[in-house]
Amino acid sequence: MNQSEVTPKNIVLIGFMGSGKSTVGRQLHQRLGYPLSDMDQLIEQTIGKKITAIFKEEGESAFRDFETLKLLEIAKQTDTRHIISTGGGIVIRPQNRSLLRKLGYVVWLHAPEDVIYQRTSRNRDRPLLNQENARERIASLMEERNPWYEETAHLKIDTAGLDSNEIATGILESARYFFTQPA
Ligand code: S3P
């Protein structure tokens, strides 16, 4: 029996805020035709509030509960050919990390700290970085989370210098290989 028979064919994108998950997710969706499940968007639709409002009014731990519930919902889907774009903190919980591995091919989009800082400083939609010392916050969160991304991913892509089209091409080539390997 090979991976194609036992493993759901979802492609799951993980990585820090601003690493390009949503953009690359849209590229993969366009090129493969698989539906795109953007977890932050799905949570906003379900709760009826923007992520910033959820953090402000209900707190981070409530958001983490919504995130795990959404992941459990996705894991129950019978159609397992989706592109799943996650929020940067999805790897915090061990339960989420093991669920993600079971969902399909997990790709970690990695970008250097200064690139993340440049990208995320352009908007105020990320409650965890809406503070004076955003740069230090990025550094400490990355240090804490990198081992979890590493542990969860089947593939790590260093995105520096690559555009979203090139990143999507790399993912598609390696996913094709992964899904045809013996389990
Ligand atoms: C978060 C990342 C965000 C969003 C929330 C928390 C995090 O998603 O889920 O603001 O803890 O890293 P993006 O990675 O899409 O910005």
Image: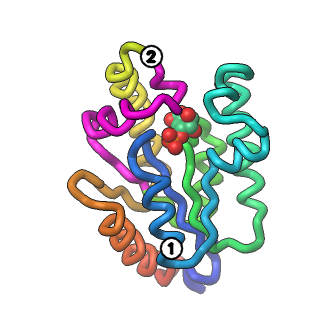
Q: Is residue 91 visible?
A: no
Q: Magenta residues?
A: 108-130
Binning the other alpha carbons within 10 Å of mark 1 as few (below 14), some (14 to 19) or many (20 upward) gives few
Q: Residue shown at 70%/42% (left/top)?
A: 44
In the depicted structure, whether residue 85 falls above or below residue 145: below
Q: Disc 2 beta carbon < 8 A from ligand 1?
A: no
The residue tagged with tag 2: helix, strand or loop? loop
Q: Which mark is residue 30?
A: 1
Spot occupied by residue 100 in the image (x, y as percentages of width and height):
60, 54
Amino acid type assigned to the residue bearing label 1 in the image: Gln
How many numbered markers are drawn?
2
**The image quarter in which residue 171 lies:** bottom left
Q: Which residue is mark 2?
A: 131
The residue located at (54%, 60%) in the rendering is 12
Give above or below for 45 relative to 83: above
Residue 60 visible at all: yes
| Image mark for residue 96 | none
Residue 25 percent across, percent down from the top left: 50, 61
Residue drawn at (57%, 65%) of the image = 83
Is 146 or 55 nearer to us in this picture?
55
Q: CA distance from mark 2 to mark 1?
A: 35 Å
The furthest residue to the left: 161
Q: How is the image coloured?
A: rainbow
Q: Amino acid at mark 2?
A: Gln
